[in-house]
Image (cartoon, rainbow, N blue to C red):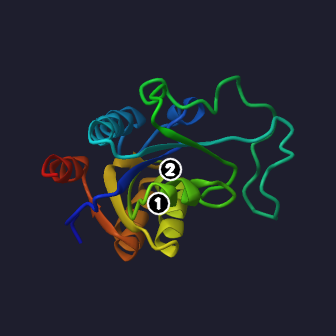
Amino acid sequence: MPVTTLDPATALVVIDLQNGVMGAPGTPYSTADVLERTVRLADAFRARDLPVVLVRVTHAADDADAVPGRTEAPRQAGARPEGWDRIVDALAGHPGDIVVTKRNWSAFYGTDLDLQLRRRGVTQIVLTGIATSIGVESTARAAHEHGYHVTLATDAMTDLSEEAHRNSVERIFPRLGETGGTQDVLKLLAER
């Protein structure tokens, strides 16, 4: 389903566009392209006094707050470089933005994201970020479960795997909300 409308109280939620994530290769879009499109969206939301939420993921240096449980995937060992969890400069530094720190895939679990959105009367979110099939999809699922209208700017997100990105965009996202491109969202914002 294409993007049809934006509620009067719509927020942009940006997943993990931070220093330590931006260095990863993105597919099908480069991380630089995702950042450029997200910056355009953030500027448009700010110009209309709509909330911009910058979500970052972090972990304690000793992994004391790492998510428990057995997985087949190995955990990243060792300390991460200084500043790896800082929001990229192109998005950071706007005093009205909301910064949410997560320690899981979803930006809702264990954070105050829902509270921050509800305090502002937000009924819809537009999602961008990295990685499509992990942080973005987990947040989209939780937003849907929390009763938000979900819009996914699919050209403003990317993944480590094109197959995983495609699966999220083609099979999962249409069940959670509306999908479209950055230009679709910008057009609807311009019509407000």
Q: Residues within 10 Å of mark 1 (few under 14, many from 20)?
A: some
Left or right, residue 157 beside residue 143: left
- Residue of label 2: 131
User: Against 12, is 108 above or below?
Assistant: below
Q: Is residue 153 above or below residue 86?
A: below
- Residue 20's place in the image compared with 76, above or below, is above
Q: Which amino acid type is shown beneath numbered disc 1? A: Ala
Give the percent coordinates (x, y) of residue 62: 87, 38
Task: Answer with left or right where residue 106 lies relative to residue 29.
Answer: right
Mark linked to residue 45: none
Tell me the kind of residue under disc 2: Ala
Q: Which mark is residue 164?
A: 1
Q: Residue furthest left?
A: 191
Residue 78: horizontal and vertical position, in percent?
Answer: 81, 34
Q: Position of residue 184 (x, y in %)?
A: 19, 53
In the figure, residue 101 lies in which quadrant?
Answer: top right
Rendered residue at 54%/32% (across/down): 87
Q: Quadrant of the N terminus?
A: bottom left
- Labels 2 & 1 near each other (Cβ < 8 A): yes
> Relative to residue 77, is residue 94 drawn left or right?
left
Residue 125 x/y as whole percent: 39, 58
Q: How far is mark 2 from mark 1, CA to CA?
A: 9 Å
Between 162 and 127, which is closer to the camera in this rendering?
Answer: 127
